[in-house]
Amino acid sequence: MSIGPDDINQIAHLARLKIDEKDVPKLSGDLDNILSLVDQLQAVNTDNIVPMAHPMDAVQILRKDVVTETNQREKYQAVAPAVEDGLYLVPKVIE
């Protein structure tokens, strides 16, 4: 499949992109290369290939879910402009 200048301009119009006319030949070549790569990928026989969620059989080692910091709410709320019952009071922004 070949992408011509008219195709590039139509795609740019649909995507609401402004493309300089001097860039059209390069973009045409780039899109031709991309589409030829897609054609090569579609030509590969994948009948006996098992789909994988991830190409590596790796297990992610997670750390234990343990609290490592102390609660400093009182310290932080001591410098807040407005606090009530342990909550920060903020100005109303939506009527």
Image (tube, grey):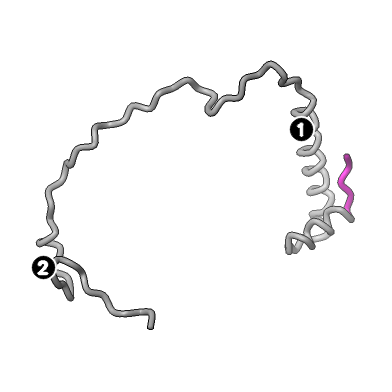
Left-right relation of 43 to 53: right
Name the spot of residue 51 as percent of width and height, x first: 61, 24
Q: Residue at x 16, y 72 (%)?
A: 83
In the picture, the quarter occupied by the N terminus is top right
**Which quadrant of the figure has residue 78?**
bottom left
**Which quadrant of the figure has residue 42?**
top right
| Label 2 crowd bin: few (<14), some (14–19), many (20+), radius 10 Å | few
Vertical order, 82 against 70 (above or below): below
- Residue marked by disc 1: 37
Q: Main secondary structure of the magenta part?
A: loop
- What number of labels is visible? 2
Left-right relation of 63 to 48: left
| Label 1 crowd bin: few (<14), some (14–19), many (20+), radius 10 Å | few
Per the rendering, the mark at residue 78 is 2
Q: Nearer the viewer, residue 64 or 34?
A: 64
Q: Residue at x 83, y 54 (%)?
A: 8
Q: Is residue 2 magenta?
A: yes
Name the spot of residue 92 as percent of width and height, x first: 31, 80
Question: Does dot 2 land on a helix, a strand or a loop?
Answer: helix
Vertical order, 79 against 30 (above or below): below
Question: Mark 1: which amino acid?
Answer: Leu
